[in-house]
Structures are given as C-alpha cells and as structure tokens.
Image (tube, rainbow, N blue to C red):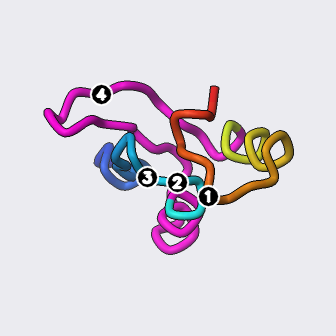
Amino acid sequence: MRNINENIVFVNDNEDINELINKFKNKKKTIALCINKKKVVLGIITVGDLRRAISKYKDFKSNIKTIN
C-alpha cells in the first residue's frame, strides 16, 4: 500500500501560482492540499486545475485562491 504523502504536496492559501508550480515540479506530485494558518484544509488543487488556471490567468503571481 502506498503512503498518501507520496502524491500530495501542501501549500498555504497565501502562496502564488508560481510557488505551486515549483512544488509540483520539484517533488513530482499531482495533488496539493491548500491549508490556512490554522492548518485547516481549504481545498484540493490538482495539476489539471493548475493548467486551467495558467491558461485562464496567464499570471504566475496570481494567488492560488484564484484557482477554482
């Protein structure tokens, strides 16, 4: 059985899209859990969500909260 942490990266809700891209790229992950300062999960972001956000906003400095 695989460990869940093998496929998941954690991001803060105040990070930008560029930081998320680097985390996905450097760790070869496909799913990100977006958490706030209290460590509460706010949402899940997949590589597909990220691709759609990039094509929509074309601004890597946009906050990851804009990904929906």
Judging by the rendered image, the residue that carries numbered circle 2 is 16
Inspect this view and state whether residue 48 appears.
Answer: yes
Crowding around mark 4 (Cα neighbors within 10 Å: few <14, some 14 to 19, many 20+) is: some
Tell whether label 4 touches label 3 (CB within 8 Å): no
- Ranked by sequence position, the earlier of labels 1 and 2 is 2
Helix, strand or loop status at disc 1: loop
- Ranked by sequence position, the earlier of labels 4 and 1 is 4
Q: What range is drawn magenta here?
A: 20-48
Tell whether label 2 touches label 1 (CB within 8 Å): yes
Residue 50, how many percent across, how many down?
67, 45
Give the left or right position of residue 47, taking residue 54 as reference. left
Judging by the rendered image, the residue that carries numbered circle 4 is 41
Judging by the rendered image, the residue that carries numbered circle 3 is 15
Residue 13, how many percent across, how many down?
38, 40
Q: Disc 1 to disc 2, how far (Cα)?
A: 5 Å
Q: Disc 2 to disc 4, how far (Cα)?
A: 17 Å
Using the image as rendered, state which of residue 52 and residue 63 is in the foreground: 63
Q: Disc 1 to disc 3, how far (Cα)?
A: 9 Å
Image depth: mark 4 or mark 1 in front = 1
Inspect this view and state whether residue 1 appears.
Answer: no
Q: Disc 3 to disc 4, how far (Cα)?
A: 14 Å
Q: Amino acid at mark 4?
A: Val
Q: Quadrant of residue 37?
A: top left
Is 18 above or below relative to 9?
below
Judging by the rendered image, the residue that carries numbered circle 1 is 61
